[in-house]
Amino acid sequence: MDHALLILVFLIGVALLFDFLNGLHDAANSIATIVATRVLPPIYAVGWAAFFNFIAFLFF
């Protein structure tokens, strides 16, 4: 493998790691808001967040 391909693989890995961590923090913030305002109980809020975060990659 040449250096360009190695750098490309590294950058893609960093981008995927960033996306994972960003989604992790966004999900926690959205769940906290819904639970704090008592719109949904925690178990339903986590279920909704998991479902919509899983489905989101199909649209965006």
Image (cartoon, helix red, strand yellow):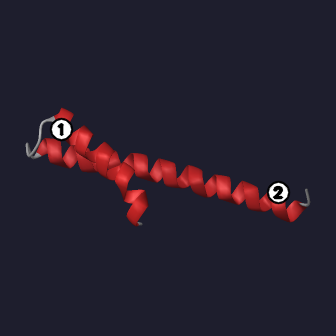
Residue at image mark 1 = 44
Quarter holding the C terminus is bottom left
Residue at image mark 2 = 6
How far, Cα to Cα, is label 2 from label 1? 43 Å
Q: Amino acid at mark 1?
A: Tyr
Q: Is residue 1 above or below residue 32?
A: below
Q: Is residue 30 above or below residue 59?
A: above
Q: For the view shown, which residue lies furthest in the top direction?
A: 43
Q: Position of residue 26 (x, y in %)?
A: 35, 52
* Visible residue check, residue 15: yes
Q: Position of residue 11 (x, y in %)?
A: 69, 59
Q: Nearer the viewer, residue 38 or 5?
A: 5
Q: Nearer the viewer, residue 4 or 25?
A: 4
Q: Residue at x 82, y 57 (%)?
A: 6
Q: Position of residue 14 (x, y in %)?
A: 64, 54
Q: Secondary structure at mark 1?
A: helix
Q: Secondary structure at mark 2?
A: helix
Q: Quadrant of residue 35?
A: top left
Q: Residue at x 25, y 39 (%)?
A: 47
Q: Residue at x 50, y 49 (%)?
A: 20
Q: For the view shown, which residue lies furthest in the right direction?
A: 2
